[in-house]
Image: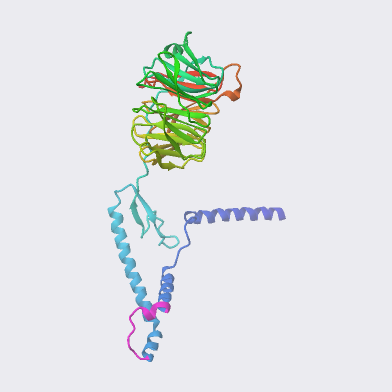
Amino acid sequence: EIKKDSLEMEELLSLNMKRTFAMFSDRVNEPAPEFEFAQKIKVASKISSEYSHVLEPPASTPLDAKNEAKQQPSKDVIKIIHSIEADKKERVEKNAQSETSNKSTSSSIVMYAPSTSAVGGDQSKVKNGAMILSKRPGPKVPTPSWHAPWKLQSVISGHLGWVRAIAFDPGNEWFVTGSADRTIKVWDLAKCAAGVEGGLKLTLTGHINCIRGLAISPRHPYMFSAGEDKKVLCWDLECNKVIRHYHGHLSGIYALALHPTLDILVTAGRDSAARVWDIRSKQQIYCLAGHTNAVGSLLTSTADPQIITGSHDCTIKLWDLAAGKAFTTLTHHKKAIRALAAGKREFSFVSAAADNLKRWQARDGMFLNNMRGHNSIINTLTLNEDNVLFSGGDNGTMTMWDYETGYPFQSHTSVVQPGSLEAEAGVFCSSFDMSGCRLITGEADKSIKIWKEVLVVRC
């Protein structure tokens, strides 16, 4: 019997709870109603007790008249209550007019809607006293341009060490690669891309350490090379011999670049300085000092800043070539900067470090946007005329970006060649050919890989 009674009691309690919930479910999230008359009296009494003696300017009345004014707060309370009611009526009429005028607008949001209904009253969504404001348009997200996907076309082997530098002939017929095996190899682009024999045309020797920089002059039959042996060499491509040496670096050289219009060569390396050379006289024009660690990347342009350097001290410097001084230092990166690439359609550039990629305005170094998505130590950047940016990582990962929006539209992971370790899947250098339709990468497994665009028919 006791169990039956307890069961009946539980059923009654659950039924009671259900009925209670059904009764008050429409007001679960609403605050408790406020009694307006009590609130008015509370506010009015506070006003009369604290500010009654300053509501009107003091008059020169005797002390008894002042005491009589203090002893009559009830009249002031009634006046205040009447004024509050009149103000409320005016607000209600204004809100009703605004609601009727804004019924046709669908992009409105209610910023503040105090509950003025009592318990069991009207539960409409738009309350009296609501402030209706137009919705602010959100920020526009840039739409990336469509780019064709890329795939591996052929693999070239021939070097006995890491491939660290690539440069293309201005005529787009051949290209050169520099390696840790201390040699420079000249390759026929058409044969290498087709994967036929006879792609290797020439092997040049002259360095005694890893070659880190290569550049081919578009105005003279010269090629320039720099390496970790502190040598900067000028090669005559008509006789395939070294004709000039540029002496001055105190340690290994990591980057080399030619000026687009002037007969100037810029090199930078582990001695924390970038040196500007006269190609013909072999004389050093400037020693651009200011970095506190190795300079790992270089850019040159025809307009100021004509030289941009990225260093392992996490800074980028924009240099005034006429004065030989840096006029801007960018400190946004938190990791060593190993690669830079200049924009083709706009006067901007992008820098790469292990934290992310950043795009800058070249004229004054203004920050434009971040490019996130390649989580690796990025060794190389290259950009073509179609605004396709390539980044190669130390762990073999490769990402294709839309340069304008920073959207990564394709990712790859390099596959090591047979006989190589998995740890040798690293991309050290890259370059697009003059047409922008082929990409060549130099990797840690001693191979050279050629990539091409996949022809996709868009409906």
Q: Nearer the viewer, residue 25 or 5?
A: 25
Residue 318 seen in render: yes
376 displayed left or right of 325: right
Taking the view exactly as shown, the residue that stands out farthest to the top is 197
382 displayed left or right of 183: left
Q: Position of residue 375 (x, y in %)?
A: 52, 33
Q: Using the image, determine if residue 155 lies above or below residue 344.
A: above
Q: Nearer the viewer, residue 94 or 272?
A: 272
Q: Position of residue 136 (x, y in %)?
A: 35, 48
Query: Dividing the picture into quarters, in which one does residue 396 lie?
Result: top right
Q: Using the image, determine if residue 91 lies above or below residue 428.
A: below
Q: Position of residue 114 (x, y in %)?
A: 41, 60
Q: Is residue 54 magenta?
A: yes
Q: Residue at x 43, y 17 (%)?
A: 175
Residue 381 seen in render: no
Where, quadrant-wise, is the C terminus in this rendering? top left
Q: Using the image, determine if residue 193 lies above or below residue 335.
A: above
Q: Nearer the viewer, residue 272 or 354?
A: 272
Q: Nearer the viewer, residue 117 or 287?
A: 287
Q: Position of residue 204 (x, y in %)?
A: 49, 15
Residue interval drawn in magenta: 49-62
Q: Residue at x 38, y 22 (%)?
A: 217
Q: Is residue 291 magenta?
A: no
Query: Dividing the picture into quarters, in which one does residue 446 lie?
Result: top right
Q: Residue at x 43, y 79 (%)?
A: 49
